[in-house]
Image (cartoon, grey):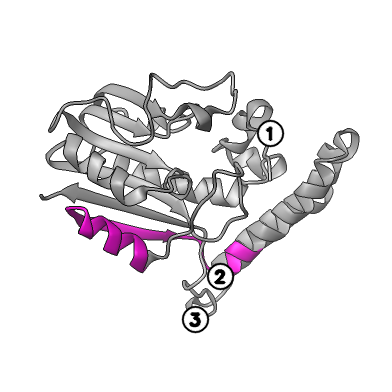
Amino acid sequence: MNYSRKNKANIFFSKSIWGVFYNPFYIIRKELYKGIQNYSKLFQGKILDLGCGTMPYKSEFCNVTSYIGLDIEVSGNGDTKSQVDIFYDGKEFPFENNSIDGVFSSETFEHIFNLEEILLEINRVLKPDGLLLATCPFFWPEHEVPYDFARYTSFGLKNLLEKCGFEIVAYEKTGNYFIAMVQMQALYLYFFINKIPVFSSIFFILFISPIFIIGSILNKLLPKFMKRKDLYLNNIILVKKIT
């Protein structure tokens, strides 16, 4: 499944409220921005953005002195908007031990086949008590194929991070069972209208926007017991290096 990142990155990463009229990722993106903004202000000094791509969240880290984009070459997929500063071999970071104040990685872990090895590498380059903020999907279609390798439950992600020398500081699930279904219904329709660009904008406003708007309103009105958290969109986790 190809999301045409080269041509549509700005639309897909939009955090504008008006995205309800043009962004097929409106709900998942809104929730990701909210979660990242909750913790980005904690980061200072030299920050590494692992799997940075086009660096869509760089502006959220306003207290840092250095923001470095690190990625493997294959993940760029020829994207001319890519802002990678340093490419690495997918195994070893080109940084010294205890040299980085914080690491941010959004929607990258699912594309790393050797994730435990990379988490140990993150631990190596982080300074003592250095922070790692990561997001990764739980309920989402395969994407950037064939480099989509995994989905992590909250339990699996926490266990893996603790195994690699990190302490859990904060953890969030974005969305819930109901709002995840709303996002997927909208995305399902978008995959069809995306093939007929002449009518796509009109179709989006007439059929997809109402799904987002009505779904968002209902999500606020529904009682808590109806908004189950065993199905959700993304993991957002903040950890610090302890070993």
Q: Are marks 1 and 2 in contact (CB under 8 Å)?
A: no
Find out whether residue 139 is within the magenta segment.
no
- Say which label, 3 or 2, has the lower sequence index: 2
Side of 187 where 153 appears, left or right: left
- Say which label, 1 or 3, has the lower sequence index: 1
Side of 93 where 110 appears, left or right: right
Q: Position of residue 133 (x, y in %)?
A: 31, 45
Which corner quadrant of the image does residue 122 belong to?
top left
Q: How far is the residue under mark 1 from the one under mark 3?
A: 38 Å
Extent of the magenta region: 155-181
Which corner quadrant of the image does residue 195 belong to?
top right
Identify the element where label 3 is drawn: helix
Q: Position of residue 64 (x, y in %)?
A: 25, 26
- Say which label, 1 or 2, has the lower sequence index: 1
Q: How far is the residue under mark 3 from the one under mark 2?
A: 11 Å
The residue to which callout 2 is attached is: 177
Identify the element where label 2 is drawn: helix
The residue to which callout 3 is attached is: 225
Select label 1 or label 2 by which is in front. 1
Mark 3 residue crowding within 10 angstroms, few (<14) / some (14–19) / many (20+): few
Select label 3 or label 2 by which is in front. 2
Q: Label 1 sits on what residue type?
A: Ser
Side of 122 where 228 appears, left or right: right
Identify the element where label 1 is drawn: loop
Which corner quadrant of the image does residue 160 belong to?
bottom left
Q: How far is the residue under mark 1 from the one under mark 2?
A: 27 Å
Q: What mark, if any, has residue 4 been given in the picture?
A: 1
